[in-house]
Amino acid sequence: MTQQFASDNNAGICPAALSALIEANAAGHAVGYGDDPWTSKAADAVRDVFGAPAAKVFFVFNGTAANALSLSQLCKPYNSIIAHAVSHVDTDEAGACSFFSGGATILPADTPLGKLTPEAVERLATRFSGVHHVKVRAVSITQSTEMGTVYSLAEFAEVCGVARQHGLKVHVDGARLANAIATLGCRPAEAVRGVDVLSFGGTKNGLGFGECVVFFDASLAEEFDWRVKQAGQLNSKMRLATAPWLGLLGNGVWLANARHSNAMAARLRDGIADLPGVSIMFPVQANAVFADIDPKVQAALRAKGWTFYTFLGDTGCRLMCAWDTTPETVARFVRDFAEEAAGT
Ligand SMILES: *Cc1c(COP(=O)(O)O)cnc(C)c1O
């Protein structure tokens, strides 16, 4: 299939991850369930990236599991988690967090640009108290956000600070954390300052599959192995899932992939921003462009074979770039778009 803008998960596995997989496979037999050299090296590589030698690292198949298992590790059944109203944990995981925690719920905040604000966290953290209400236990921050925006380090620190003031744990949904780090230009350690547990995304960044859960506060990871196993997330041929992480994290491929997809999104934005019948909805700070597009133009683009999602009403479209999106694909899309926009 030709390249599309529907999702970064439409892309395949990146060459560095694939060759690491082929190499691990060629090495023959290895012990199962993560008791192998690739897995321990991959966990070390994750700790190195974040400058967190004491962190506990667990590999799971997907982001829903990473989020739901890490949040359920933090929560008792009567707890709740403050998260954005469009967060993946609240809107795209079929209630997995509640299921795996035995009842914990999400308290959504509908703040601008997909970002939690300190005020919203404060309001939700203090709105209720006492035994008749769910007890707030954690804040879950998506970085980069579902709207393709990025919390600045100051904004991020403020949200973490309010969480801390109220004794709340901080979880980060980092399905696209790499894109945020590429944009911020900071050290990865700075991007996770104040975070207790991170769902670190590999799939959208260039793996075939796989995310990991990083407990920066190692004391929170107690018996997490059982949670992973019970949820059906313990890979028996673990090395084939973890070797690609070595390919991704070695030589900074993960950041190069993120910088590339971000750059393609910026190029796409520049190409369509001034066309008639289009307006860019949010600052493009990661690998997604949200654009308000005339439904007639949308239909014409789809008729030409392009796929993308209309997420917000009838006109709010998401155009998502991936590690392999080429400038030529962007140019072709922009050309088609310009033709159709001129006709309306
Ligand atoms: C894609 C994504 C995930 C992970 O989703 P899975 O399909 O379960 O792997 C988690 N959070 C965000 C913000 C995502 O975009």
Image (cartoon, rainbow, N blue to C red):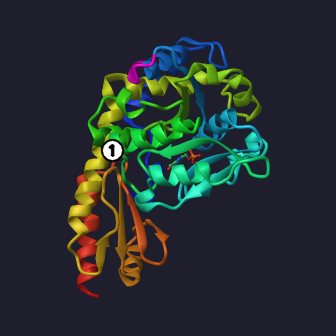
In the rendered image, residue 74, in percent from the top left (x then y), is placed at 66, 34
Up-down: is 65 above or below 284? above
Name which residue lies at 58% across and 28% down: 59
Name which residue lies at 64% across and 38% down: 71
Up-down: is 304 above or below 109? below
Name which residue lies at 62% across and 18% down: 34
Name which residue lies at 70% across and 48% down: 129
* Number of marks drawn: 1
In the rendered image, residue 99, in percent from the top left (x then y), is placed at 75, 46
Q: Name the quarter where the C terminus is drawn.
A: bottom left
Q: Which of 19 and 275 is in front in this view?
A: 275
Q: Is residue 308 visible?
A: yes
Q: Is residue 171 visible?
A: no
In the shown orientation, is residue 261 left or right of residue 233? left
The residue indicated by pointer 1 is 152
Q: Name the quarter where the N terminus is drawn.
A: bottom left
Secondary structure found at label 1: loop
- Figure quadrant of residue 92: bottom right
Q: Nearer the viewer, residue 10 or 194?
A: 194
In the rendered image, the residue lying farthest to the bottom is 344
What crowding class fits label 1: few (fewer than 14 Cα within 10 Å), some (14-19), or many (20 or more)?
Answer: some
Beta carbon of the mark 1 residue lies under 8 A of ligand 1: no
Q: Which amino acid does label 1 sit on?
A: Ser
In the shown orientation, is residue 59 left or right of residue 42? right
In the rendered image, residue 279, in percent from the top left (x then y), is placed at 30, 73
- 51 falls in the magenta region: yes
Q: What stretch is highlighted in magenta?
A: 48-52
